[in-house]
């Protein structure tokens, strides 16, 4: 219920912005919210809402509210709100992106919030785009150390059709101050993830299907935050509508 109130409040706030503001917003429903091959919704369907405001100088301010469905990975939290300050610039045909975001959990048992920084570089040629990214969460008690994610990603739009094919691969690593908490973002330690997906885009409506996988073994783990049974191969669908 709390996350539904947060989503409604976020959308109401967007509707109240001046008409001159450059705003992007939307709602989404995923059969399983997966990030870096890990479920963030305990393997269950997860609704979300997002909004972003473009600011002068290439900066933008955004927020996303997601239902995490009591996921043990996040201490039983029922939702997460993620405010983000971003920056983007085009340099010699390349697009440079950077951001700072906070993951603020509601209804969790204990302190689960943490912050993260990130940067990406991408290049587009016709309907194809390829890029690299790095995300870093400095050492924090909520994640039992620090966390570094390095990844590559690509997407290709099929000409004269509404279909787009996507793919990605990445590696998560970091230091360990508290092994129980570190298993939250890295069950079993350093691991690799990959994905392959297809999207059908018609105007503001996007329907997607994505396969994600990791090399994390599905075996008993002493950490209640590891949730290894939701870190293996999975096929998930999502539908989003921009408003």
Image: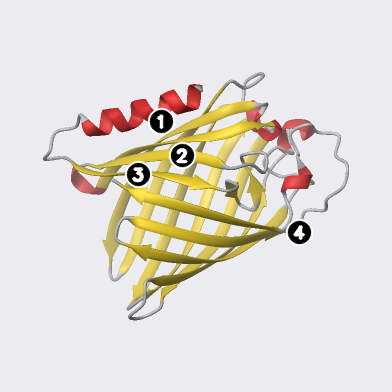
Which label belongs to residue 7?
1
The residue identified by callout 4 is 215
SS under mark 1? helix
Q: CA distance from mark 1 to mark 3?
A: 10 Å
| Left/right of residue 105 with respect to residue 164 in the rendered view | right
The residue identified by callout 2 is 48
Which label belongs to residue 172?
none
Q: Residues within 10 Å of mark 4 (few under 14, many from 20)?
A: some
As drawn, 214 above or below 177: below
Query: Exactly how many numbered labels are in the figure?
Result: 4
N-terminal label among 4 and 2: 2
| Left/right of residue 114 with respect to residue 226 in the rendered view | left
SS under mark 2? strand
Residue 234, position as x, y percentages in the image? 68, 57
Q: CA distance from mark 2 to mark 3?
A: 9 Å
Q: Residue at x 46, y 27 (%)?
A: 4
Identify which residue, 141 or 8, lies in the foreground.
8
SS under mark 3? strand
Q: Residues within 10 Å of mark 3 (few under 14, many from 20)?
A: some
As drawn, 9 above or below 197: above
Q: Residue furthest left?
A: 20
The residue identified by callout 3 is 26
């Amino acid at each position: 219920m709390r996350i539904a109130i947060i989503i409604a409040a976020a959308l109401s706030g967007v509707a109240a912005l001046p008409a001159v503001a450059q705003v992007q917003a939307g709602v989404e429903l995923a059969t399983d919210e997966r990030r870096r091959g890990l479920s963030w919704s305990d393997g269950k369907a997860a609704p979300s809402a997002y909004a972003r405001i473009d600011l002068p100088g290439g900066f933008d301010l955004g927020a996303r509210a997601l239902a995490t469905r009591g996921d043990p990975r996040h201490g039983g939290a029922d939702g997460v709100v993620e405010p983000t300050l971003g920056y983007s610039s085009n340099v010699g045909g390349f697009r440079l992106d950077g951001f700072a975001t906070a993951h603020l959990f509601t209804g969790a048992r204990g302190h689960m919030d943490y912050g993260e920084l990130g940067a990406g570089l991408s290049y587009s040629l016709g309907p194809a785009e390829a890029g690299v990214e790095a995300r870093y969460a400095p050492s924090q008690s909520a994640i039992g150390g620090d966390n570094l994610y390095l990844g590559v990603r690509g997407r290709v739009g099929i000409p004269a059709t509404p279909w787009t094919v996507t793919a990605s691969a990445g590696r998560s690593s970091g230091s360990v101050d508290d092994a129980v908490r570190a298993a939250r973002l890295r069950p079993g330690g350093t691991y690799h993830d990959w994905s392959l997906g297809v999207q059908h885009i018609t105007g503001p409506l996007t329907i997607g299907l994505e396969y994600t996988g990791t090399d994390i073994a599905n075996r008993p783990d002493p950490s209640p935050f590891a949730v290894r049974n939701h870190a293996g191969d999975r096929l998930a669908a999502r539908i989003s509508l921009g408003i």
